[in-house]
Amino acid sequence: MKRSIAQLKEWFRRGKYPTEAQFADWMDSYVHKDGVVPLSQVENLTWLLNGKFSASRGEALELLMQALRREFDRHKEDADDEFEKIENNRQALVAEDERQQAEIDAQQAQITAAAGQLETVRKLLHSGASWANIKGAFDGLGSNYNSLWALARTVKTFLEAADTSDATINRWQELEAFLQGVTDTDSLLALLEEQKNEIGKEYVAYVNEQGEQLTEAIGAAHMKDIRALAKAISVKSVTWAEIKQLRDAGHLDDGTLYRITDYETTVANDPEARSAGHPFDLVVMALDAGTLSERAWAMRSARDTAGYFAGAKLESWQVWYCLDNDTTRFQWADTVTGKGVIYRLIDEWGNDCPYDFKNVQFKRCLTSGDFVDNVVDDADWPNTHYILSPSMNGQADMTADETDYKWLYTFTYLEQMQDVRDASLINEVNADFESAYYNKACNCNEMQAYYIGEFIDDTTFATQALNNIVLSSYDEENGAAVKMYGNKWGAGCFNMTFHEHCYGNSFGVNCYCLIGFKLYYNTFGNYLQYITAGEGVKYLNVTGGIDVKHFVQNAHILNGTSGKDSKNLLTVGLPEMSTVCRYVGQNTAGVLKIWVPADLV
């Protein structure tokens, strides 16, 4: 059996004679080097894991890198298209050059033939030949002569024309400008070759220019993506109104983190609940231009001038947040002054509630006597909740002043039954527990959401509502908070109050109107109503009903009712839909008894 260091030292002091059992306990108190150390015994493991890079931020970074890859691929495709266009233009220029060269060669052949025939005519004219011979030479010119004449007239017309909008005229005027300064020693082929080389130079220059522009474009796009990544890693500070306007207009920067610097939890539509108004900032991420992720982060706010959250690790919190004050989703949404709704929060101690339990408080009335149990008319339950005075002597006093009340947190520490503090922010040292993790006064409590049917604008919605569950602890003698950890509430648990030293309890589906005192290691089944468990109730399995039409209800479990241990629970079977209150307890022989007091009269 594992023993404390102090106990072991006491057994093995000088002059002591440890027994065989004490030697065995000494060995069992340490981990052998060949043994495996359980994860639960690794010091600070939870804190170290809380400090790791969160999965949501890793997913966001992966989305950014995917966007960068898509942008790069798009630029690459654009570059490939531009190079393909340039190559097509080059090939078109080569083809056009070859076509024009063929036309020039054909025209040159015609000009050569005509020149020969004209030379024959000229010689005949100068030689004094007969008209018949000269006429025969002209007749030999035939269509070539007619073509040359028509060409000359066309050239003359084009060169004298002033209509510069005519593409053909412009082409001939360019030809005229080209021919100016050409000497009779320049051959047409040489001139065309020179022009082809010039065209080639211009083409190469064009390709180089386009390549540089494409390179610059790709580089600029890359830098844009790098800037976007840097922008995403940094955080933009905005107000709630500003980010809502950006979201609604579709002007969010994809992947960017936004810090909402004026967020404050508010509560509406529930007279039994309010917000304490302790400020902290929220950080949300834009998934695209019009969408925000509802997975958020908490950060300490400059507005927290009193240092309310100074001892908390807000950076370790997990937050689920909706930007809209949507009453079809959240019954307590404030459509007037609200700045969105936190509908789930997990703190650094594993407390997990479907609302901002660091701010939301529930109303509890003070009693005028020592003890109030739940033996009241069923009609009082939905509207009446009690805080018990500290003496806990078991005497019933049904009077309560509902004008005298306090606002309690889900996890409340009442110092001297006066000052209300959030027990989830208290870290008390308790010698009963060696693990630093369990020195926390409040941890590992999990609560599932509670839903109601809301009829809005002729439509019924399954709307999440506040659970109205309170665990309150106090220590009148020592003024120190007592333990509240490991409690788990199933879906639909509502309107429950537990006092002092509650831990290791599990509550099933649809349980409400339950009161308990110093509960630990109990299992409560589904569909329970109006159940009170007294002080020291432990190791019980209270079975429940089968559905919402078959609740187990109206029972009072007496102080000290207990099973053997956490592995041997004592089963308490209660009838469904009871109209009278049954009492549950153990007789002097330890046998479980369930009875109705009036039946004994």
Image (cartoon, rainbow, N blue to C red):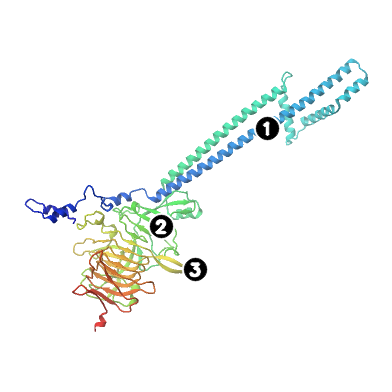
Judged left or right of residue 17, residue 508 is: right
In space, the residues marked 1 and 2 are separated at their CA atoms by 66 Å
Which residue is rendered at x = 52% and y = 36% of the image? 216
Q: As shown in the figure, which amino acid type bears the numbered disc 1?
A: Ala
- Mark number, residue 581: none
- Residue 573 seen in the figure: yes
- Residue 236 seen in the figure: no
In space, the residues marked 2 and 3 are separated at their CA atoms by 25 Å
Judged left or right of residue 219, residue 392 is: left
Q: As shown in the figure, which amino acid type bears the numbered disc 2?
A: Tyr
Q: Which of pointers 2 and 3 lies earlier in the amino acid sequence? A: 2
Q: Quadrant of residue 319?
A: bottom left
Which residue is rendered at x = 76% and y = 27% of the image? 106
- Kindly state the secondary structure of the residue where label 2 is placed: strand
Image spot of residue 568 (x, y percent)? 25, 66
Image spot of residue 536 (x, y percent)? 22, 68
Image spot of residue 337 (x, y percent)? 42, 61
Q: Quadrant of residue 335?
A: bottom left
The residue that mark 1 highlights is 95
- Mark number, residue 321: 2
Q: Quadrant of the C terminus?
A: bottom left
Image spot of residue 268 (x, y percent)? 40, 65
Which is in the foreground here, disc 1 or disc 2? 1
Q: Nearer the viewer, residue 178 or 200?
A: 200
Which is in the foreground here, disc 1 or disc 3? 1
- Kindly state the secondary structure of the residue where label 1 is placed: helix
Judged left or right of residue 392, residue 195 is: right
- Kindly state the secondary structure of the residue where label 3 is placed: loop
The residue that mark 3 highlights is 457
